[in-house]
Image (cartoon, coloured by chain):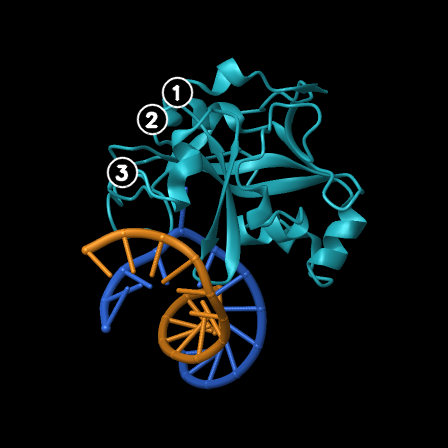
Chain colours: A cyan, B orange, C blue
DNA sequence: AAAGAGATGGTCT
DNA sequence: GACCATCTCTTTT
């Protein structure tokens, strides 16, 4: 179980995104350890009409233009938080949205945070997984590659069994045809 | 099993 | 004032 190297996130979001599948996102927010395996992601780039960064840098999307390996957190529909892994180089506004995880550790705490919902619904959505891992707006900009962070991206050597599935992104109204959504075969 | 709608607030025009 | 990178509950087949 080693932290993910920042250099592995420095490429194009569309190339980096499928490589995030199978990695482990660890939360130590609040003291307890909760972990989930990345099962579904979506890539967003600066030249992409569906991306928050398409119209340039603003206070909200500032993190996406920063260093790769940091966490970009935003408020969705005024209700839910969504978490992204920043990719690309400094100055390039791109990131990969974490759409779903598979619970790996701390499932009891996830159940509490998710109000006793069935296990398969604990982390099968971008807002849901943030809830289960207690990710809030405070965590925008956290370095996922630093061992001292409360939120980290880890590699436990998991090997994907089968072929990564791709498809169009979800919940957007522009650039709907780009097949930049990736998920594990087991889903 | 699928479809519809309300909640709710920040961000940008 | 419009637009959301969503979720949950309710209503209808």
Q: Which mark is residue A137?
A: none
Tell whether A49 sits left or right of B7: left
Residue drawn at the location 36% of the way across and 22% of the way down: A12
Secondary structure category for the residue under label 3: loop
Q: Identify the residue under disc 2.
A: A92
Q: Quadrant of residue A104?
A: top right
Residue drawn at the location 66% of the way across and 49% of the way down: A134
Q: Earlier in the sequence, mark 1 or mark 3?
A: 3
Marks 1 and 3 sit apart, C-alpha to C-alpha, by: 15 Å
- In the displayed structure, A48 sits above or below A23; it is below
Marks 1 and 2 sit apart, C-alpha to C-alpha, by: 6 Å
Q: Quadrant of residue A157?
A: top right
Tell whether A64 sits left or right of A85: left
Tell whether A7 sits left or right of A105: left
Q: Which mark is residue A89?
A: 1
Q: Earlier in the sequence, mark 2 or mark 3?
A: 3
Residue drawn at the location 48% of the way across and 20% of the way down: A9
Secondary structure category for the residue under label 2: loop
- Using the rendered image of the protein, determine whether residue A124 is visible from the camera's viewpoint: no
In contact (CB < 8 Å): disc 1 and disc 2: yes
Marks 2 and 3 sit apart, C-alpha to C-alpha, by: 10 Å
- Image coords of residue A130 (percent x, y): 60, 49
In contact (CB < 8 Å): disc 1 and disc 3: no
Quarter of the image with the C terminus of chain A is: top right
The chain carrying label 1 is A
């Amino acid at each position: 179980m080693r932290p993910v190297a920042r250099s592995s996130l420095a490429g194009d979001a569309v190339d980096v995104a499928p490589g995030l599948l199978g990695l482990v996102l660890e939360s130590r927010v609040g003291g307890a350890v909760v972990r989930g395996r990345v099962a579904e992601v979506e890539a967003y780039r600066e030249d992409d009409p569906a991306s928050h960064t398409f119209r340039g840098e603003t206070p909200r999307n500032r993190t996406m233009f920063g260093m790769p390996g940091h966490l970009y957190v935003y408020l969705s529909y005024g209700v839910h938080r969504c978490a992204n892994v920043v990719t690309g180089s400094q100055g390039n506004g791109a990131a990969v949205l974490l759409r779903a995880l598979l619970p790996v550790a701390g499932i009891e705490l996830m159940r509490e945070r998710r109000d006793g919902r069935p296990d398969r619904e604990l982390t099968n959505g971008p807002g849901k997984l943030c809830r289960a891992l207690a990710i809030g707006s405070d965590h925008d900009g956290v370095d996922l590659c630093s061992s001292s962070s409360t939120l980290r991206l880890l590699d436990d050597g998991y090997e994907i069994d089968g072929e990564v599935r791709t498809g169009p992104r979800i919940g957007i109204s522009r650039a709907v045809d780009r097949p930049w959504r990736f998920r594990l075969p087991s889903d």
